[in-house]
Amino acid sequence: CIKGQKLSISLREDTEKPLVWVSLRSVDDFPANKMAEDFFNGGGHLNASGGEFYGPMEEAVNLFKQALVKYEKLLVVKK
């Protein structure tokens, strides 16, 4: 765990079809499952979830940037 970081994401391209596999991990109360559901056709547990994106990696990265904007307030580490 990196101090002050609440979320990590892994994006992996499928080798046989235009698909990007998404893995989200979080700490504390950040809802990785909700982000996966809202943006990547997925779900899972509060702090460990995943999903998929049908399209090229560049579009998956752009979608993740949109997700960061939506969940920005929840990413702030409270002191």
Image (cartoon, rainbow, N blue to C red):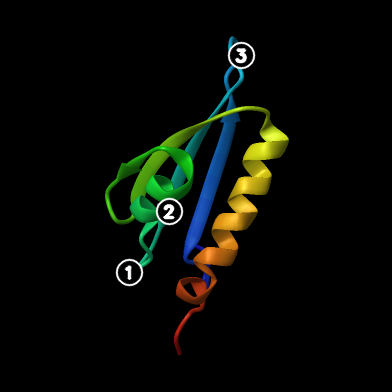
Q: Which class describes the residues within 10 Å of circle 1: few (<14), some (14-19), or many (20+)?
A: few
Cα gap from disc 2 to disc 1, whole angstroms:
13 Å
Q: Quadrant of residue 34?
A: bottom left
Which residue lies most toward the bottom here?
79
The location of residue 9, given as percent across then percent down, is 53, 48
- Camera-nearest residue between 71 and 78: 71
Which residue was labeled with disc 1? Answer: 29
Mark toward the viewer: 3 or 2 = 2
Which disc, if any, is residue 15?
A: 3
Cα gap from disc 3 to disc 2, whole angstroms:
25 Å
The location of residue 70, given as percent across then percent down, is 53, 65
On the rendered image, what quadrant is the C terminus found in?
bottom left
The location of residue 13, given as percent across then percent down, is 61, 25
Answer above or below: position of 55 versus 4: above
The residue at 52%/67% (across/down) is: 5
* Left or right: 74 as drawn, with respect to 56: left
